Image: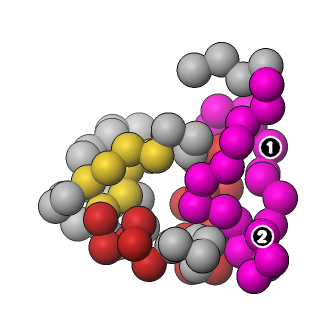
Amino acid sequence: MVEEAACALCGTARDLRRLPIYQMDVCLSCWVEAERGWPQSAEPALFKALAAQGLLIPDRNEANLLPRAYAPPADFAL
Ligand SMILES: [Zn+2]
C-alpha cells in the first residue's frame, strides 16, 4: 500500500495533521468537524487504521460516535 500525504477522510492534501491514536492523517476541516466525534462516513477509514495497528475500536461517545481522540490504555507504548 502506498501511503500518500492526504486526508484519510476527504483526500485533500492541505492542512494535514496526524492522529496519534489512529495513525492516520486528516485535514484541519475534517478534524474540526469531528469535534463531537467522527462522522459515520469516516468509520470505515478509522476501523481500517485501527485494525492495521491491531488496536481495539474505542468506546462510542454520548453521541454514539467514535471519539476524535481518546486516552489509550496505560500499557499503550507510543
Ligand atoms: Zn479531510
Q: What's the residue at 24%, 47% (across, down)? A: 5
SS for dot 2: loop
Does 31 sit left or right of 11 as displayed? right
Instruction: Judge by depth and name the residue closer to the eye, 57 or 76.
Output: 76
Residue with the mark numbered 1:
56
Q: Which badge, 2 or 1, comes first in the chain's sequence?
A: 1
Picture residue at 20% right of the left edge, 59% below the top: 15
Residue 17 counted in the magenta span: no
Packing grade of label 1 (10 A; few <14, some 14-19, many >=20) is: few
Foreground disc of the pair 2, 1: 2
26 to the left or right of 40 = left
On whether ligand 1 comes within 8 Å of the CB at mark 2, the answer is no
Measured as percent of width and height from the top left, residue 34 is found at 51, 73
Find residue 77 and report its horizontal and vertical position in percent. 65, 17
User: Does the rendering let one see residue 39?
Assistant: yes
Where, by quadrant of the figure, is residue 63 drawn?
Answer: bottom right
Residue depicted at x 71% and y 74%: 65
In the image, residue 13 above or below residue 17:
below
**First to last magenta residue range:** 52-74
Give the residue at the far left of this rendering.
14
Q: Which residue is mark 2?
A: 61
Front residue of 41/60: it is: 60
Secondary structure under the numbered disc 1 in the rendered image: loop
Residue 76 numbered mark, or none: none
* Location of residue 27 (image quadrant): bottom left
Find out whether residue 56 is within the magenta segment. Answer: yes
